[in-house]
Structure formats: C-alpha cells, structure tokens
Amino acid sequence: MDTLRSLLVQNQTNLDRLRARVRYLFLLLHSNELDTHKLYGPYADFWDEWHELTESILADTRSDVAATIDFVGELRDFIRYAEALPTKKQTRVYTKRCVEMDALAREAIACQRDMLRMADMRIAEHKEFTDRLLLVESIDGLSDD
C-alpha cells in the first residue's frame, strides 16, 4: 500500500506541474489580448497566429490535465477502498488488483512525463516564435526612426 501512496504522490506532483503550465499559458494568452498594437499593428496577422498557437497549446495541456485528474481521482479512491478493507478480506484477488493498479499508476506516470515533455517543448518553441516576432517588430521600429 505504501507503494501505491508513493505513486499517488508522484501522479499528483505531475498533475500540479501540468496545472502550472496551464496557468502560465492562460496568463500569457490574456496578457496580450488587450494590446492594441498587437491586435491592429503592422504585424497583427503574425500575432493572430501567435494567439492561435497559444490557444492550441493551452487546449492540449488542459486535456492532459483533465485526463490526469481523472486518473488521480481513481487511484485515490482505490487506495481509500483498499485501506478500508479489513485484513481478513484481503485475498489473492485483492492482491492482484493492487498489483494491476500499481502497474497502471506507473504507466500513468510515464504518460504524464511525456505530456510534460511535450508541453515544455511546445512552450519553448512558442517562446522562440515570440522572441523572433518581438525582434522583427523592434528592428522594424528602429528602421522607421
């Protein structure tokens, strides 16, 4: 049972990390929504693409969070059920289910690591796109002066 609790903590930690990425993307998206220069300036089309890319990453990460929330809830419920079960009722079936849940929790952790890696990669690419766009705007602003 200690192993399952440990796996629950790891799953919850990954969930918190995914939620942090959602918060970052949400704040990033809304920080640029009211910038009229970006909405109506000479590079508005590129900022529209930036906005769509941000929304896409946010939607995918929210989907990952939802899937992780579901699994963490199921794992937590299983642990509560298993802890409430009297020792006399713990049979081979119980042990088999604990082993299966252990395997599922480990697989979920691997999937969550992939989700985090993918989200980080997409966020890094998005940051590069943002930096290039800001650089082009600043160079264009200098050439106007």
Image: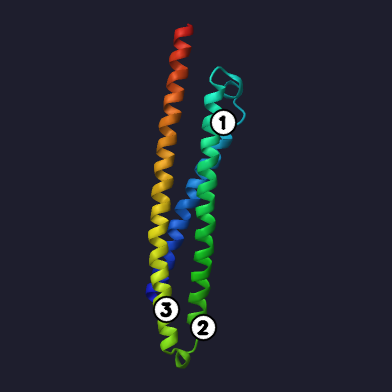
Structural crowding at the residue carrying mark 2, measured as other residues with C-alpha within 10 Å and reported as few (<14), some (14–19) or many (≥20): few
- The answer to whether residue 124 is above or below residue 65 is above
Relative to 32, residue 139 above or below: above
Determine the residue positioned at 41% across, 75% down: 100
Residue under pointer 1: 32
> The residue tagged with tag 1: helix, strand or loop?
loop
How is the model colour-coded?
Answer: rainbow
- Give the amino acid at mark 2: Ala
Q: Nearer the viewer, mark 3 or mark 2?
A: 3
Label 3 packing within 10 angstroms: few (<14), some (14-19), many (20+): some
Is residue 10 visible to us here?
no
The type of residue carrying mark 1 is Asn
Residue nearest the observer in this picture, 90 or 46: 46
Provide residue 65's location: percent of width, then percent of height: 51, 54
Q: Which residue is mark 2?
A: 84
Q: Which residue is mark 3?
A: 98
